[in-house]
Image (spheres, rainbow, N blue to C red):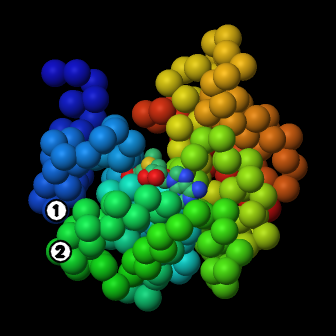
Amino acid sequence: MTIEEYILAHSDEEGKLLSTLNRDANVNLLRPRMLSGHLQGRILKMFCRMLRPKRVLEIGTYTAYATLCMAEGMEEDGLIHTIEINDEMEDFIQKYLSHSPYKQRIKVHFGDAMQLIPAIEETFDMVFIDADKRLYSAYYDLIFPKVRNGGLILADNTLWDGKVVEEIHSNDKQALGILAFNDKIKQDDQVEKVILPLRDGLTMIWKK
Ligand SMILES: C[S@@+](CC[C@H](N)C(=O)[O-])C[C@H]1O[C@@H](n2cnc3c(N)ncnc32)[C@H](O)[C@@H]1O
């Protein structure tokens, strides 16, 4: 048994719908590793249990795996706005939302987050940044005024497969985007921050 298997065996199960979604994505989609998965999904749910956010923004829906996990941890009157640029994901997303008891807590927007975010009139308690790595800093600047003081921003993949401590090629725009974001957050004294070495790196950013 690996340590990862041990962790999962001693944590909550992801449940039938999410394990079916996970299998479906692995068989039928390109880049299924993009979805949060069992462990990170349970952690996102736990954040919602603990923080009880009323309004959540997710940038990068993909299969809605993480969306469903966060919705599961939210209260009845909570709402997640989740944004996905690839409208070819719509059928997949709707198929799983339609089977979820939490679907009324989820609003999916199709389009570019950079264009859609300004039009969403909400103050967010929690934001999960998980889309184009080249745009992390731009997403952050866009969402920051919409996050309440005391709100939490989570950013995924901030260790970028360990590349953050390796020599980066100047044409690796995604790695450069992550590096710039990590430096920006470190220097931002409007927030407290810590990188969790979970999976591919998950940064917790708390707005003072
Ligand atoms: C890593 S996946 C999201 C995984 C999902 N949050 C989860 O944890 O299961 C990133 C997604 O962001 C989408 N994306 C990339 N750029 C985007 C943008 N500018 N606006 C909205 N979505 C974007 C991609 O199409 C892709 O589906």
Q: Which mark is residue 17?
A: 1
Q: Amino acid at mark 1?
A: Leu
- Quadrant where the C terminus sits is bottom right
Query: In the orientation shown, which residue stands out farthest toward the bottom?
Result: 77
Asked if marks 1 and 2 touch (Cβ < 8 Å), the reply is: yes
Query: In the orientation shown, which residue stands out farthest toward the front?
Result: 88
The answer to whether the residue bearing label 2 lies less than 8 angstroms from the nearest atom of ligand 1 is: no
- Looking at the image, which is closer to me, 147 or 61? 61
Mark 1 and mark 2 lie on one chain; the one further toward the N terminus is 1
Residue at point 67%, 11% (across, down):
167
Query: From where the camera sits, is residue 145 visible?
Result: yes
User: At which x and y percent is residue 49?
Assistant: 42, 67
Query: From where the camera sits, is residue 69 visible?
Result: no
User: At which x and y percent is residue 103?
Assistant: 30, 79
Query: In the orientation shown, which residue stands out farthest toward the top?
Result: 167
Give the structural element (helix, strand or loop) at label 1: helix
- Quadrant where the N terminus sits is top left
Residue at point 27%, 24% (across, down):
3
User: At which x and y percent is residue 128?
Assistant: 55, 58
Q: Which residue is mark 2?
A: 99
Residue at point 43%, 79% (across, down):
107
Using the image, determine if residue 206 lies above or below residue 179.
below
Residue 16 shown left or right of residue 193 in the figure: left
- Between the residue at mark 1 and the residue at mark 2, the CA separation in whole angstroms equals 8 Å
Q: Amino acid at mark 2?
A: His
Q: Residues within 10 Å of mark 1 (few under 14, many from 20)?
A: some
Residue at point 37%, 47% (across, down):
36
Residue 24 shown left or right of residue 162 in the figure: left
